[in-house]
Amino acid sequence: MNLKKTVIPAAVLTALLAGTISAPATAAEDVTMAFCTWTGYAPMFIAKELGYFEDAGINMNIEIIEDESTYAALLVQGSVQFLATAQDPNIKMFANGAPSRYVLAMDASCGADGLVTNADIKSLDDLKGKTLALDTAASSYYFFLTALEDASSLKEEDINLAQMSDTTEAGLAFMSGQVDAAIMWEPELSEALESVEGAHALVTSADYPETILDSLVVTDSYAAEHPEVVEAVAEAWYKAVDYLNENPEEACEMMASGFEEVTAQDIAGDMEGLKFFGREENQTLNDSKTERSIMAISQDMADFWMEKGECSTDDLTDFFSLLG
């Protein structure tokens, strides 16, 4: 048998031995993540700025998409691989056919969302016949309905609901005197309380801290094909939260830089009503043996929307399949 030898030129061999020529680098994996303008998702900008994605061989493209009503279509079409939004709409999208899988919890609103009313409205029951501005596509809708069901005798139809395109528009409608009350989040929440005489927060997410919980999901097909990328994205998030906890001022600058017309001061203000979930917090949430695990919290959401006729299933087994 005649074997051919591969001959390496002397100059190339010398360079290889000297370490001046390296093997071709593996091409970075192109990945797209989407979320809206909200501080709870902003540590992803820390991960991008500090090279956590790049170090893992990920070319991360972050798209800011404000219209949350398009999110399910993005997942179905495969236009994005990762999506960050509230756990409540994530559950609804999955239950109605979106090919999503839960990755991790990002943050919880602990006062950053609220129902602000004029001085005449002193209880939830006082909302009867009043006009309330809100965005039913936003995460705060579940918070509102939970509070209404828990602490009033009213039903949704007892209130004149003014549908808004987003929570910012709802806040502006209240501050301009167009409506009696509004569901809003920061920074409009603080602005309304400061600028409108007699305005007060009737109820906030601090009263119902499990109702507005943001999470990261990935499409099922991408998770099956690239489990290492899913793991790397989660690791980048945990490192970003650690950096935020250790370097808050620098972190706020990085977080603000990813959004338009958002300052580091805006981010710092929002964070007063937020709790971020790092590695340890996620480990606790993901433990099915704990009373209020992410599975238990999510099951409450699924059951609630099943009763409202807005979910086709309340079986979340596949949704949490990546947790093992």
Image: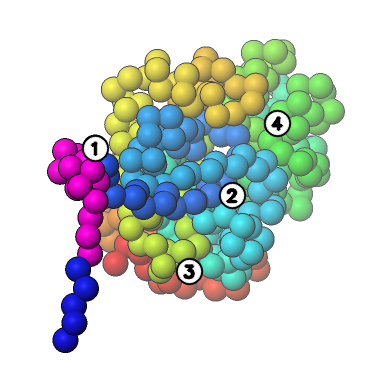
Q: Secondary structure at mark 1?
A: loop
Q: Position of 63 compared to 252: left or right? A: right
Q: Earlier in the sequence, mark 1 or mark 2?
A: 1
Mark 3 crowdedness (10 Å alpha carbons): few <14, some 14-19, many ≥20 = some
Q: Which residue is mark 3?
A: 221
Amino acid type at circle 2 is Tyr
**Percent x, y for residue 37?**
60, 34
Considering the whole magenta stretch, tell me its main secondary structure.
Answer: helix
Task: Tell me, yes or no, whether the two marked residues, 4 and 1, touch with CB atoms within 8 Å.
Answer: no
Badge number at residue 142:
2
Task: Tell me, yes or no, whether the two marked residues, 1 and 2, touch with CB atoms within 8 Å.
Answer: no
Amino acid type at circle 1 is Thr
Mark 2 crowdedness (10 Å alpha carbons): few <14, some 14-19, many ≥20 = some
Per the rendered image, the range of residues in magenta is 6-19
Q: Which residue is mark 1?
A: 20
Rounded to the nearest angstrom, the CA distance separating label 1 from label 2 is 59 Å
Q: Earlier in the sequence, mark 3 or mark 4?
A: 4
Q: Nearer the viewer, mark 2 or mark 3?
A: 3
Write the residue at 23% across / 43% down.
11
Q: Nearer the viewer, mark 3 or mark 4?
A: 3
Rounded to the nearest angstrom, the CA distance separating label 4 from label 1 is 55 Å
Is 12 one of the magenta-colored residues? Answer: yes
For the residue pair 182 and 319, the one nearer the viewer reads as 319
Amino acid type at circle 3 is Ser
Q: Position of 118 compared to 315: left or right? A: right
Badge number at residue 168:
4
Q: Secondary structure at mark 4?
A: helix
Q: Secondary structure at mark 2?
A: helix
Q: Is residue 73 above or below residue 264?
A: below
Q: Nearer the viewer, mark 1 or mark 2?
A: 1
